[in-house]
Image (cartoon, rainbow, N blue to C red):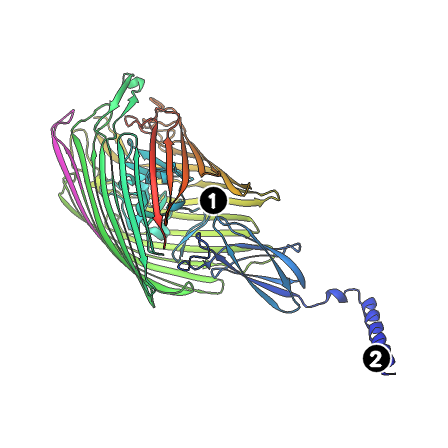
Amino acid sequence: MNLRKSLRRSAHVLAVAVAVGAGCPESTAAQVTGAIEVHVLAASPDGPADPSRAPSPLFGASVTARPSGYTASTDENGVAVLRGVPPGWHQLEVAAPGFETAAIDVAAENGRTAVVRVALTPTPIPLSGIDVSVGRDALPAGSVTVDVAELPADVVDVPSAVDALPGATVVRRGGPGAPAAVQLRGSGSDQVLVLLDGVPINAPVTGVADLGTLSLDALERITIVPGAQSSRYGPRALGGVVLLESRTADRTSAAMTAGAGSWSSRELTGNGSWVSSGPWGVSGSAQWSRSDGDFPYEVPAFRGGGEADRANAAHARIGAEASAVRKGVVDLTLRAHAMEIERGSPGTIAQPSLTGEQRERRIGSSLRATAGDPVRGASLFAAVQAQHAEYVDTAPPFGRAYEALTRVRVVETAGEGWWSRGALGVRGGIEASRMAIESDALASPTASVGELGVWSRLDLRPATRSRGRISAGAGIRVDAHELVDGVTTSPQITASYAYGETRVDASWSNAFSPPGVGDLFFQEGVLVEPNPELRPERVRNELSLSLRHRWTLDFGLAVEGRATAYRADVDDMIQWFPDFRFVWSPRNIDVSRRGIEVGSTFETTLWGRSHTLAVDFARSHVAYRDEALTGQLPYRPELTLDASLSLALSPGTLTASARHVGARRSVPGSELNELAAYTLLDLGVRLPLKLGVAGGALDLAVTNLLDERAALLVDYPLPGRGWTVRLRLNRNP
């Protein structure tokens, strides 16, 4: 009887439910939606077995639910929230540039929030054009970074590492160890600010940073920030900024590299780090290298033709770095570095010298104290640096023997703070520096230059909506420089829109660069004189627009496309010209800059291994706006093309890279003696090794495989085909 009543009651309830469902067709869909909170982490490249490198939050990763299509992006804490998700199982695809895409199944429940954690594994080769951040200071859109440990075998020094990055052109004056300077977006080398651990290494007299004095094995990361960046970094950032970071102790390890190559090149480097179970970590490295440097070259027809030897091109370098880190309520980082290089000064091929020599020393240290977290905090920075450069020629081909000496001492201090709440972020800081110069090349043997800059930036990053996310920022910097009258204001406005795998970035900015000490106060000589009336160089109303999209195809192929267009006119650019007396001196001249950069990266996985192809094309038109001069500026290649291929094979990794540099003018306002375009092809092979408890790799590389006889600058030929062999051993307990 009780069973019969229970069945009758159940049937009645079921009938009512059916009737309600029939009367309200949407009732089954009226369940309360849920949410999925995804914490995305960047896993250690060494895998979860390495406890010293805990995963860190990953900003800007995209999370997409299939098949519903709900999407979100992670915030600065690595958290993305999918809201309004229907109950049931969903497959989440988590992707970020430079990391392998992950997929995970998650169940959404009525009115509840499901929390999951996903750790993305870094891909072996970084994509070009991705946005990165160093420390807590996010970098602008279009910034490109590369970890030195991930560079392919055919990248043999700092100049070649920078030259391989999109938008950069390195001007070399010879072979291994020779002076080398970087140009960004058609700018001059003195318009690019190069910072080593936050301290400028640009020469005070010329304003140019010599990449040939640096050791690649002493660096951990190289970052390029293109475009006018004075709103954040101050003077000399008209064309962009190159950020160089030395190694820091992040785990206990030891490594050694021994190498040899053509032109009697030899090198030996070692580095190690130790991280305690407590707050301390220390690291250090030392490098030694030398090369005879002499090589044959083809003499241009207008110099008489034929073949000659580039003599007196030897170099020897020794350097060391050390750092100590203490983690706590206040994180402390102490760094110190020292370097000495001796090079022959072979001169131009029109005026070769067999007795010229160059000696340069650089020593410095810095201390940074940081307190807080990514939401709010502050840091203090102090650095001192001393440079010593000496140029000697006892028997030059023309003129009298000379000995020029330059000594520089730099003291720099800076403070910075940041605060964020919700979608709003604020940063700001103050920087001050004093540079004392003693130089035989100046009209006055001593000079002192000071600078004070104050900057701030406001960022607005609303939460991601179903139609994407729009973010914007505005920054401004005010500089008082002793070589410029009054104060200079450098504003910047940025905006971006991101939807799924598509991102659009736009920026407007101004920048300035003071005249160089050498331009203003160079010691007057034969057919050379300074110009104390020079005005500072200024970039007004630089506009930049970039687009990036990534496709992930079903058959294991991922494609990233990117394009950037910019306009960045320069008022009062400083150029050296001869007057009617054939006396050379600097003067101000207006220049227009227009450019486009287009690139694509293809990644695929075949036979369980990753393969990558990257192609980047740049056209930079840098022309005079002066009525008396027309056309492209000298030594600004209008067209450049870079292509790199990486194949992960069973014994190791094969890489090939090609760089095409277009024709270049060598005379202002004229196509006379225009230099022909050239293409350089490099090949590299990396073979992993396991020797007992140590791992490592054997790197084999051939540079300029086609033996192209080229010169980016007239009278400064580049070497032909070369080779290097490097044995790298490391041990990570």
Can you identify the residue that label 1 sits on? 127
Query: Which residue occupies 34% across, 25% down?
Result: 710
Range shown magenta? 389-414
Q: Which mark is residue 655?
A: none
- Percent across and percent down for residue 613 are 49, 37
Query: Which residue occupies 13% across, 43% down?
Result: 445
The kind of residue on which mark 1 rests is Leu
Query: Which residue occupies 77% across, 65% down?
Result: 26
Quarter of the figure that contains the C terminus = bottom left
Q: Relative to residue 42, is residue 673 depicted above or below?
A: above
The kind of residue on which mark 2 rests is Ser
In magenta segment, residue 208: no
Can you identify the residue that label 2 sits on? 6
33 and 333: which is toward the camera: 333
Which image quadrant for residue 411? Answer: bottom left
* Disc 1 to disc 2, C-alpha distance: 67 Å
Badge 1 marks a residue whose secondary structure is loop
Which image quadrant for residue 238? Answer: top left
Q: Is residue 222 visible?
A: no
- Percent across and percent down for residue 390 are 16, 39
- Reading the chain from its start, which is encountered first: label 1 or label 2? 2
Q: Relative to residue 296, is residue 613 depicted above or below?
A: below
Q: Relative to residue 458, is residue 532 depicted above or below?
A: above
- Percent across and percent down for residue 624 are 36, 33
Q: Is residue 332 visible?
A: yes
